[in-house]
Amino acid sequence: MKSLPSGEQALQLLRESRCSLKVIKHCKAVAKLALETAEACKGNGSNINLELVEIGALLHDIGRSKTHSVHHAVVGAEILHAAGLPEPVISIIKRHVGGGITTSEAEQLGWPKDIYVPLTIEEKIVSYADKLIKKSKRVPIEVTIEELAEEGRHEAAERVLKLHKEIAKLTGDCP
């Protein structure tokens, strides 16, 4: 595997890609929460690559340097592929939106045929942490689920709830 950039190199990539300061602040907040979540999972016996979680979370919205639509996931994956980053980081970026994008949703969006649902624990943690950060502040998962439902995105709300339950089990936060 190609080597992962350091945290500082990841932030430099965001700046070089012309991400706004708001996006960079959001990415830092997601990375902090993702690392806390990953460490809790690891403390409960899960095998997790903490460095991959941190770098994936820092870079998850790099595509927002070009678009603020849902397409930022695919655009971000293209940016990181062109920069020669390892596939596990690219997968985090393309699979982080909406708790995952189904094959039919990706087709409707006109995305290349691929998997856009988080599969690895690292991908799931970054996707989940992103759903708990609005701008750069932490929000309860219920807020995100309610917003998705209000937007009529019931499948995405279901996926986020399922992700929440899975991560809660792994961190030991479930009742």
Image: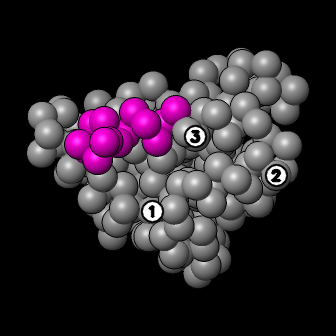
Q: Is residue 62 above or below residue 100?
A: below
Residues at badges 3 and 1 in contact (C-beta under 8 Å)? no
Mark 1 crowdedness (10 Å alpha carbons): few <14, some 14-19, many ≥20:
many
Image position, residue 171 (x, y; %): 26, 44
The C terminus is located in which quarter?
top left
Query: Which dot marks residue 30?
Result: 1
Foreground residue among 171 and 119: 171
Image position, residue 134 (x, y; %): 60, 68
Question: Which residue was labeled with disc 3?
Answer: 160
Give the mark count: 3
Q: Residue at x 84, y 32 (%)?
A: 109
Q: Secondary structure at mark 1?
A: helix
Residue stretch in magenta = 162-175
- Indicate the amino acid at tag 2: Glu
Image position, residue 108 (x, y; %): 87, 26
Q: CA distance from mark 3 to mark 1?
A: 16 Å
- Indicate the amino acid at tag 3: Val
Q: CA distance from mark 1 to mark 2?
A: 23 Å
Color theme of the render:
one colour
User: What's the magenta bit mostly, secondary-structure-wise?
Assistant: helix
Question: Which residue was labeled with disc 2?
Answer: 150
Q: Earlier in the sequence, mark 1 or mark 2?
A: 1
Query: Which dot marks residue 42?
Result: none
Q: Is residue 82 visible?
A: no
- Indicate the amino acid at tag 1: Val
Q: Earlier in the sequence, mark 3 or mark 1?
A: 1
Q: Is residue 83 above or below residue 110?
A: below
Residue found at the very far bottom of the displayed protein: 21
Q: Relative to 120, is 72 on the left or the right?
A: right
Foreground residue among 4 and 104: 104
